[in-house]
């Protein structure tokens, strides 16, 4: 990816809340650049295709950039209690690192400004580049695994049960994100409930196919109900 393409993607991300994960968001990204560049018109369709890909490939490029930024934002996670304890931490010289829980809540918050477009984003990722579905929901599943892995890194989780821990957290976050799409006001409380009962979650994950089946059925329903695929 060229530097100019990466810069345009960076400017397109804040536009998602207005335009969704669309080629239009990419087209208007050029208008958000330094005024000294004197861009007065959005990018043409041919320019978007040349820079980001033809058709929905351009949208996939934007969606993946948004997902990558969500992972990056988890690295600067702060605890909701950080400001309350700042004085005492400074006095003792101690520093409270964010927890796995903090990181997962940060990632849920990242969805909030564009939540109405998230089913559309997964529908695009799940759709084949050409031809007719079946849907491929592996990108959404990999998304949850990436978030679980980053949460463990941010939270300095050194569990000896590395794979089990990440599988459990991926399932928990995936369930919380699915809940967020239908009940955003209770998503954070739901995430806390799942984390507090993670031993029960882990037991259910002993049957590896259980969560996968639940996840795939849930996402298929959400994507179809979004109307993106007609």
Image (cartoon, rainbow, N blue to C red):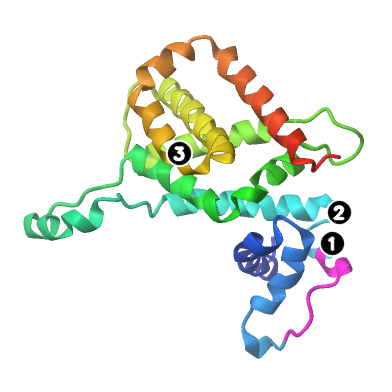
Question: What mark, if any, has residue 55 been given in the picture?
Answer: 2
Give the residue number, with chain letter if any, for mark 3: 186
The answer to whether residue 213 is above or below residue 14 is: above
Q: Secondary structure at mark 1?
A: helix
Viewer-nearest of discs 2 and 3: 3
Q: Are marks 1 and 2 in contact (CB under 8 Å)?
A: yes
The answer to whether residue 145 is above or below residue 111 is: above
Q: Is residue 70 left or right of residue 21?
A: left
Q: Residue at 32% x, 52% y: name it.
A: 78
Q: Is residue 168 left or right of residue 158?
A: right
| Residue 51 percent location from the top left of the image | 78, 64
**Residue range of the region highlighted in magenta in the rendering:** 39-48
Q: Earlier in the sequence, mark 2 or mark 3?
A: 2
Give the residue number, with chain letter if any, for mark 1: 49
Asked where in the image residue 153 lies, by quadrant, the reply is top left
Q: Is residue 219 left or right of residue 159?
A: right
Tell me the distance, in whole angstroms, between the alpha carbons under discs 1 and 3: 40 Å
Q: Residue at 55% x, 56% y: name it.
A: 113
Q: Earlier in the sequence, mark 1 or mark 2?
A: 1
Q: Earlier in the sequence, mark 1 or mark 3?
A: 1
Q: Secondary structure at mark 3?
A: helix
Tell me the distance, in whole angstroms, between the alpha carbons under discs 1 and 2: 7 Å
- The N terminus: image quadrant: bottom right
């Amino acid at each position: 990816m060229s530097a100019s393409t990466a810069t345009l993607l960076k400017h397109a991300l804040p536009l998602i809340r207005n335009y969704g994960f669309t080629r239009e968001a990419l087209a208007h990204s050029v208008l958000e650049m330094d005024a000294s560049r004197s861009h007065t018109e959005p990018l043409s369709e041919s320019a978007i295709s040349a820079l980001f890909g033809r058709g929905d490939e351009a949208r996939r490029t934007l969606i993946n950039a948004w997902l990558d930024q969500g992972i990056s934002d988890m690295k600067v996670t702060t605890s909701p209690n950080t400001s309350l304890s700042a004085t005492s931490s400074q006095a003792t010289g101690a520093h409270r690192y964010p927890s796995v829980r903090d990181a997962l809540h940060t990632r849920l918050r990242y969805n909030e400004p564009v939540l109405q477009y998230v089913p559309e984003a997964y529908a695009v990722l799940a759709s084949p580049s050409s031809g007719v579905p079946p849907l491929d929901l592996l990108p959404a599943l990999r998304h949850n695994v990436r978030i679980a892995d980053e949460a463990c890194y941010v939270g300095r989780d050194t569990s000896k049960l590395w794979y089990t821990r990440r599988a459990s957290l991926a399932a928990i976050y995936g369930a919380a994100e699915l809940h967020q799409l239908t009940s955003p006001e209770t998503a954070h409380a739901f995430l806390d409930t799942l984390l507090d009962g993670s031993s029960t979650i882990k037991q259910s994950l002993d049957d590896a196919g259980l969560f996968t089946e639940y996840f795939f059925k849930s996402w298929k329903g959400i994507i179809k109900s979004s109307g993106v695929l007609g």
